[in-house]
Amino acid sequence: HHGMFLEPQEKKRSMKALMVKQAKKTCSCTPAKVKDYVFSFFPVLQWLPKYKLREYLLGDIMSGVIVGVLLVPQSIAYSLLAGQEPLYGLYTSFFASIIYFIFGTSRHISVGIFGVLCLMVGQVVDREVQRAGYDLEQAALGVLTDPAAYANSTVSPVNQTSQKLLCDKSCYAITVGATMTFIAGVYQVAMGFFQVGFVSVYLSDSLLSGFVTGASFTILTSQAKYLLGLDIPRSSGVGSLIATWMNIFRNVHKTNICDLITSFLCFLVLVPTKELNEHFKSRLKAPIPIELVVIVAATLASHFGKLRDTYRSSVAGHIPTGFLPPRPPDWNLIPSVALDAIPIAIIGFAITVSLSEMFAKKHGYSVKANQEMYAIGFCNIIPSFFHCFTTSAALAKTLVKESTGCRTQMSGMVTSLVILLVLLVIAPLFYSLQKCVLAVITIVNLRGALRKFKDLPKMWHLSRVDTVIWLVTMAASALISTEIGLLVGVCFSMLCVIFRTQRPEAPLLGWVAESETYESLAAYKNLQTKPGVVVFRFEAPLYYINKECFKSALYKQSGVNPVWVKAAKKKAAKRMLREKEAGSGENQTSTSVDFVSEPLGFHTIVIDCCAVQFLDTAGIRTLKEVCKDYGEIDVRVLLAQCNPSVRSSLIRGEFFKEGEDHLLFHSVHRAVDFA
C-alpha cells in the first residue's frame, strides 16, 4: 500500500507581530484612508454625485409620495400602539426617513414605524408611567394643549405628587419612549463599531417569523378595546394577552355602539381593497391609498356627525402643527429601561439587515451589514432628541416602495417631505378622527404575519425542526411576553442544533459497484460490502456531548461491543480454568471457547470522518478508547477522510503510535483496499 504524503503549510503564529500589524493598519492615517472612511460612513456622498436625474427621479418621486401617503395614517395609528400622541408617530417617520437617506446603503428599504417594536415600546412606556404614579385609567392619547409648556417642563417625575403639574402623562410617556430609543440606538451603533453583526445569525428566518406572528396576536389584543370603545387599562408583563381578553369580556357590556359600527364599516372597506391591491399589484402602477381615504372619510363623518359629543366616541384630539424644541432623553430613566432596550435593538437591526440584504441581492447591488447597523442606530439616537420612538425597516412598506419604481435612497427624502407637509399644515384636521379607525388600520396591517399559519404544512414538509421552532417562538411571544418569547425562541433553536449533533445519523456504508464511492446502506439499495470490513460514518462533530452516542451507534451498527466480548472471554477463561481444575471433559470447554471467539464476522472497522468537523479532547479520548478496545479483540480501526482540523487534533492528541500516522486515509476506498 502506497500512502499519499501531504506537507502541511507553516503557520506563523506570532501574537506580537499580529498585534503590531493590526495596530499599524488601524492607527495609520493617510488622506486616502480618511476619504474612504468618510465616504463609507456617509454613503450619501458616494451615490448622490452619481445620481442620474432623468433616469431615477420620476421613480423616486412616485414611490416616495406613495409610501408617504401610506405612512401618514400608519404613523398616527402606531402611535396608539406605542402609547404616544399621534404627533410623535409623524415625527418618528419624518426623522427616520431623512437620517436613513444619509447613512443607509440599501436603495429600497423603507425605514420608519414597525408594529412589533411599537408594541414593545408601548409595554415599557405603560410600565414606567404606572411606576411614576400617573392615572392609567386616562385615555392612551391625552390632549396636548400647550406645546410650549411641554417643551419647558422639567425632567421626568420620580414621586409624582408635586411634579405632575410640570409634566403630564403624555409628556412623561414620550420621555420614556425617547430614552429607550436612545439606548437602543447606542446598542446598535456599538454593535456596528465592534462588528458584532454575527449576532443576527442566531435569529433564523423561522424564529423571526414566529416572533412577529406571536407579537401580532399581542398587537391585535391591545387594539381590541379601541374597536369596542372600551376604556380599560393596558395589561403588561407575563400573560398580558390572556389578562387583556379577560378584562375585555368583563367590560364587554360597556361597548360603545358607535365605535363598534365604525370599526365594522372600516373593516368592510379596508380588507377587500387591500386584497385587491395584492391581487392586481402587477397591473396597478401604484396601490390604492385606501387607508388615507378611510381616515379622511372617517374624520369628516366624525366631525360633521359630532360623534364625540353625541355618542362619547373616543377621538385622537388636538395634533399641533410644527416641531417641538429638541430635548435630551432623561438620563435618570436609563437604569430602568436599559435592559428592555436590548431585545428592541436586536430585533430592529436583525430585521433591517435581513431586509436590506434580501432586496440588494434581488436587484444586484451590495449592502454593508455594519453600516446598516450604524444607519439604524443613528435613526434611533438622533430622533430621540426630537420626541421620537424606535424605528426599523418594515417589510410591507418596503414592498410598496420597490413595486412603485424606487431607484435610490432619494425616495426616502420625498417621503419625509410628504410627512413634513402633514406636520406643518394638515395635522390639526385629524382632531375628530376616532381611535377605533386607527385600531382597524393597525389590525388590518397584521394580515401578512397572521397568514403564516397557511404556510405551516409546507414548512412542516420542508423542515420539521424549523416548524417546531416557529410554533414555540410564536406561542411564547403571544402567551408569555414579547421579550421572553424572543429569548425562548433563541434558546430553543440553539437547543435544537445541539440535539441534532447529540443524536446524529450514523449509518453503515456500502460500495457502489464500479466506482470508488461509498454510500449509506440504509438509504440506497444494491450496495455491496467487502467481506471482513465494516465501514461506519458518524455525521456530526465528535465532542463531549455526543461521545457516548458515537460509541453506542458504532457498537450497535457493527453488532459487536468489544467490552462485552472481552468480559465474555474472561468469564469463559475462568470457567475453563475451573473446569480443568475439576477435571471435567474437554468437549464443554472447547464449546464455551468457540462460543466466545466465533461470532466476529469482520477484522477491520473503517470510520468515515468526512462529516466530523472537529474533535475536542473528549472526542480524541473516545477514539483512542474505541481503537484500544477493538484492538484487544483483534479488530483494527482505520480512519478515513479526516479534514485538516481533525488530523491536526489527532496528531496533537498523540492518537497515533510512532510510525502509524500513515494509517490515516484520504478516502474510504483506499482504507478498504488497505484492509
Image (cartoon, rainbow, N blue to C red):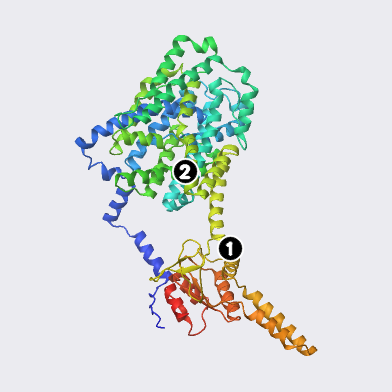
Residue 34: horizontal and vertical position, in percent?
Answer: 30, 53
Seen in the picture, residue 409 relative to 436 is either above or below; the reply is below
- Of tags 2 and 1, which is closer to the observer? 2
Spot the residue most to the right. 582
Query: Identity of the amino acid at label 2?
Result: Lys
Of the pair 284 and 160, the residue shown nearer to us: 284
Q: Which residue lies under the disc numbered 2?
A: 458
Residue at the spot 64% in from the left edge and 75% down from the top edge: 563
Residue carrying label 1: 545
Q: Is residue 522 above or below residue 202?
A: below
| Side (left or right) of 297 relative to 413 | right
Q: Find the distance from the CA under tag 2 to the CA under tag 1.
A: 32 Å
The percent position of residue 471, horizontal first and vertical second, equals 55, 43
Identify the residue shown where x is 39% and y is 76%. Answer: 8
Q: Earlier in the sequence, mark 2 or mark 1?
A: 2
Residue appearing at x 49%, y 49% in the figure: 463
Q: Quadrant of residue 667?
A: bottom left
Which quarter of the rendering shows the N terminus? bottom left
